[in-house]
Amino acid sequence: MDIVPPTPTTTEKKKKGGFFANIFGKKNSDNKKQNSFFDSILKKKPINKQGISSATSAGSSGGSSMSLDGMEIEESKVDNNTTKTASDNSEPKLTGTFNGTRLVLGYELGDTLGKGMSGKVKRGFAPTSGQFVALKIIDKDKTPARILALLDTEIRVMQKLSTHDSILKLLHYDAHVKYPCKRGGEKNTVCMALEIAENGELFDFMLSTGAFQEKLARSLFKQLADALAFCHANNVTHRDIKPENLLLDSRFQLKVADFGLAAMRDSADDLLKTECGTRSYMAPEVLARRKYDGKKSDCWSIGVVLFILLSGNPPFQIAKADQDWWFMQLLQGRPDRFWRSHKRYYPNFPQGPQKLITDMFQPDPKKRLSVEEVSQHPWLNSGLMSPNEIYADMSERKLKVDADKKIEKEKALAKKAAAGKNQTFDPFAHNPSRGHLPQPPSSVAVEVIRMPVPNSVPEHGLRGFTNFYVFTEKLPALTETVPIAILKALGSDLALQEKAGEYTWKVITKSEVQLMVSILFSPTDELFVIDVQRVFGDSFTFNMIYKGFKTTLLSEMFKDGVNDENDEINDNSNFGMKQLVPPTDEELDAEDITVSGNNDESFLGNEIDMM
């Protein structure tokens, strides 16, 4: 058992050299600032000069794919003034195993909320206060040196921005935690106790409930814009804004999270140079590897988020002229063509925000709006929903998803009842013996080999909506069918499939998505649950993979005709499922003639007049 002493008080940390210098090291003799993580944590870890492609902060829920080309540690220009620690309470920050209960930073460890490339996020519970938190556990032995170094900036940024209601709060942290493993032993970790977002990622919610109506999208986007404007006012740029990093608390209020790629600058005029973030949300100047204004690139990213909120699909795949037709229209000064083409797929896209989005998608960052200007835009400040209205709307959406899950579960229970009527069977036996089959003579001993029971569904329920019930009389058959369904669903996109446990498969695709597929068991219902979780990669791609795998698995399991004709799969929305095809030049030319013939020189301008 290891007991980690309580974190030093704020007074104890106020020493010369700054916050991290006091924790991890001091200035050297010739007054050159040492990097705290490299001096104390990472001495044995070489810096990868070629850059890395990894998840944003290790262990962040779900993870993400990102580019970190040529990251330079000194890019986070911070001063050496004393920084306040994360808020402390009177509870001792104990870590270890006590009477069978594992504690980290004084919190009892609960279920896993998410996994990343180098760590995980666990639910934590404070016994004395009854508070729940999200414990972000980063395994220092598995995390690339550059990612660990970024934690220096991440912790500073979260402390600096902790007063804003729409920014996830850092409650406690410890850079040297001996994490108690479930099966014994310890891991060297960095641990951060964060405000918990009970309703998970905004993107997961949208994937299952569909694009938002205008008033709801505007209300949530207003919270995002205000939070980013607050960051920029404090000379902080996020650099990885995307729906996966936007969380929802228990009241469905938005929380901006994951500041692992954030940059702090001494001056608002300082330019950045690192290509980092998630490519489909990155501004063209970042992708072009030019020095850029991080505040303007953040504005581009939230523009992409707003478009997705309203339509259910991204505005383009990547902001590169030679790779994306949609972006080319913006680059050529033809937003009218951009909008006309998109409205073939989204005829009900609201007119009000189109001019705002166009101004956020200015390829020239000097002409692009600032986030502060976006936050003050008339469209964004008219007809906002109250917190209670947001809660009511989002709760209703969640109830619809829960209702679909309930129907799915009831169908599985009905199959179980029909199959088990007047018959006995054991789904965990390698060769289940049904009551109607010939039985061996009583004098013959029969050895029944039983498979291990899969892990139970967590007490708090499953995270997200990418899971479904399955009834089968034979667990061995289900175990054999899962990898077959993965192979058939992914086809040539499958790069790796391997067992990660008795009933868990790790899957990596050529499209750079990693997911984990697990078989769980619900003892109460005696049903199996297939849980599919994204580790990292594009969420749109993951959504299509999940739906394709679910369809394939159920088809394989019931291809003998046992499945009911009415057992259609409840895909709650076609969010992110549309394959956009650019119009041909002939189609565009014909539309241009039509618009000109109606004296509408600018299709977009005509719509703006209607605002």
Image: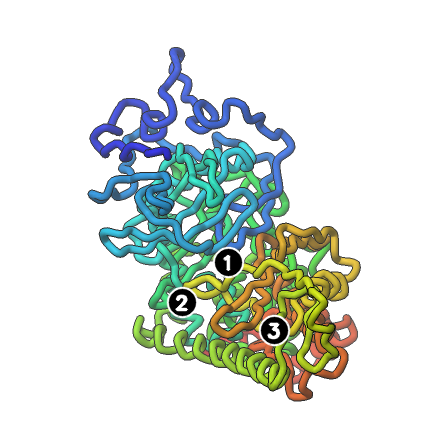
Residue at image x 63%, y 82%?
423
Q: Is residue 299 visible?
A: no
Check the picture and name the quadrant holding the N terminus: top left
Compare marks 2 and 1 and give the one earlier in the sequence.
2
Residue at image x 43%, y 78%?
399
Front of the two marks 3 and 2? 3
Nearer to me, 167 or 138? 138
Compare marks 3 and 2 and give the one earlier in the sequence.
2
Residue wearing tag 1: 244
Residue wearing tag 2: 220
Find residue 16 and report its image quarter: top left
Residue at image x 38%, y 15%?
31
SS category of the residue bearing label 2 = helix
Q: Is residue 501 above or below residue 178?
A: below
Q: Picture coordinates of residue 397 (x, y %)?
A: 45, 77
The image's colour scheme reads rainbow
Amino acid type, mark 3? Val
Q: Residue furthest front?
A: 443
Q: Picture coordinates of residue 6 (x, y %)?
A: 27, 35
Residue wearing tag 3: 470
> In the shown orientation, is residue 180 left or right of residue 517?
left
Q: Is residue 41 above or below residue 105?
A: above
Q: Picture coordinates of residue 600 (x, y %)?
A: 60, 80
Q: Residues within 10 Å of mark 1 (few under 14, many from 20)?
A: many
